[in-house]
Amino acid sequence: MKFKKKILCIGAGYVGAPSMVMIACKCPDYKVTVVDINHQRIDAWNSDQLPVYEPGLDEIVKKTRGRNLFFSTDIDNQIKENDIIFVCVNTPTKTFGAGAGMAADLQYWEKTARQILENSQSSKIVIEKSTLPIKTALAMERILASAKGGISFDVLSNPEFMAEGTAIDDLENPDRVLIGSRETQSGLAARAQLVDIYARWVSPEKIITSNIWSAELSKLVANAFLAQRVSSINSISALCEKADADISEVARAVGMDSRIGSKFLKAGIGFGGSCFKKDILNLVYLCHFYGLPEVAAYWESVVKINEYQQERFIANILKSMFNTLAGKKICVLGFAFKADTGDTRESPAINITRMLVAEHAEVVISDPKALGNAAIDMAQDEGQISYVEDPYRASAHCHALVIMTDWDLYRRLDYRKIYKSMIKPAFIFDGRNIIDQQKCFEIGFNVFPIGKPALSRL
Ligand code: NAD
Ligand code: UGA
């Protein structure tokens, strides 16, 4: 079949693959190829066991794979064959050298830029989809500018705003699609080509364009604002616990102000996920770089409150369980960083489990989708950790349940049955405020919510 356009995405991770799956689904006349250096990942994308759990993803992959969606490891040839290239490789926090612990590690991204340069035999549009520091497009342009043979490249910034667990819906019905470009004739023409792709299913008023630096920065700022809301409500949850207020009631009252809005005001154990912390630290680093220490300190406090929330939670467990966890069996319910994903990157459950193990507790981890990743995360940690998917088996003979992920499943468990199988006095630390706390208290549990008075007989 002759395709109208050929699109490549380098990086078949949580973002690259689902976003290309959506383009393939909405544009059956375009050929979409996703490549990665990780052969195992590509094999998994070509199998029935996709490497990413995301509601609704399997169905669309089944519909499009082999039709106009392809997964491959042949990066060099695919670069030659495609004229529109999305770059969606990982950009983690740097762990070495200058800026370690703050700046973005751009080594994967730069390798990709050089690979595009080496393998291109015609002019191309290169689109940054990874989240990158402001001015990265300039570095990309400089690398690509050394191309020979009359080849030229237009670099666009098209940051992705989807969230895990709701990726398919977010990609299908985005709040907005942002495309940044150079305001030159060829930059604007490249931008128009990308607008055309999204216009297949996104209404025109939701496709916004900007200068390239604004687009790069907007992505970091959007994540920083979202994380800031979570830290803001979590900071108030600490005050609620001291002053007998209820954080859910406060969040509802505050969120009903249409200027504030009700979303992202759920207090809990703190934000996780691969991006919030890394992107805020990147923003903090950029502020220092541009000589703005006060602005840097403001945003860094969002991360500090997140760490404080986890320390507070563990201190509360220790204090409530008579200041010793040694030899006690604790069931961690949920290991994913949020519901509806198997992703555990930066999950608060990792730190909490480590803190429990450091207190010599015996930990049983349960999760419907993330046990494989949990076992990888905890592989280097010494201590007694076991993995049991069934929450009823996992909680049997435990002293406490620690709810880490807001899986809907945990709202609906038979807590009476669980209570019977546990050691008494039995505790629940509801790190997500998702269970019927009053009912569990009536069953016999001592219940410790976030940002609300404890329901305890002790
Ligand atoms: P990921 O680690 O799941 O995927 C990145 C993929 O890139 C990996 O499979 C890796 O093997 C591949 N890769 C690295 N170097 C490569 C190279 N030189 N050639 C080919 N493939 C290469 O990461 P992710 O979660 O998909 O995130 C990717 C980017 O998108 C990051 O910048 C992230 O900040 C951003 N982002 C992530 C999310 C999210 O929800 N996870 C949302 C929006 C934006
Ligand atoms: C987030 C953003 O929501 C996306 O827009 C962005 O594209 C993405 O980061 C990214 O750049 O990676 P994601 O991390 O997948 O998406 O998930 P969120 O729904 O934002 O949740 C992040 C964390 O905050 C989770 O641990 C979640 O449990 C926590 N959270 C969220 C709360 O504790 N309370 C809330 O009210 C909302």
Image (cartoon, helix red, strand yellow):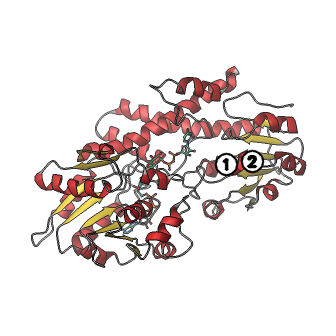
Image spot of residue 45 (x, y percent): 49, 72
Q: How many marks?
A: 2
Q: Residue furthest left?
A: 150
Direction from residue 380 to residue 162 in the image, left or right: left
Three-letter code for the amino acid on which mark 1 is drawn: Asp
Quarter that holds the C terminus: top right
- Residue 396 coordinates in the image, percent (x, y): 85, 54
Q: Label 2 CB, ligand 2: below 8 Å?
A: no
- Left or right of 32? Residue 118 is left
Q: Which quadrant holds residue 33?
A: bottom left
Q: Is there a contact, CB below 8 Å, between mark 1 and mark 2?
A: yes
Residue closest to the eye, 447 or 290: 447
Question: Which residue lies at the image location 83% right of the left edge and 47% below the top edge?
Answer: 399
Name which residue type carries label 2. Arg
Visible in this render: residue 444? no
Give the side of residue 60 with respect to residue 158, left or right: right
Residue behind label 1 places its C-beta within 8 angstroms of ligand 2: no
Ligand 1 appears in which quadrant?
A: bottom left
Quadrant of the snapshot with the N terminus: bottom left
State the residue at coordinates (90%, 48%): 420
Look at the numbered disc 1 and give the secondary structure of its residue: helix
Residue 305 appears at what percent x and percent y? 54, 35
- Badge 1 is on which residue? 408
Residue at horizontal 35 percent and vertical 58 percent from the top: 106
Residue 81, picture quadrant: bottom left
Residue highlighted by disc 2: 412
Q: Which mark is residue 306?
A: none
From this viewpoint, is residue 380 visible? yes
Q: Is residue 83 above or below residue 209?
A: below
Q: Which residue shows up at 66% across the image and 47% down it?
A: 404
Give the crowd class for mark 1: few <14, some 14-19, many >=20 residues within 10 Å.
few
What's the CA distance linking mark 1 and mark 2? 7 Å
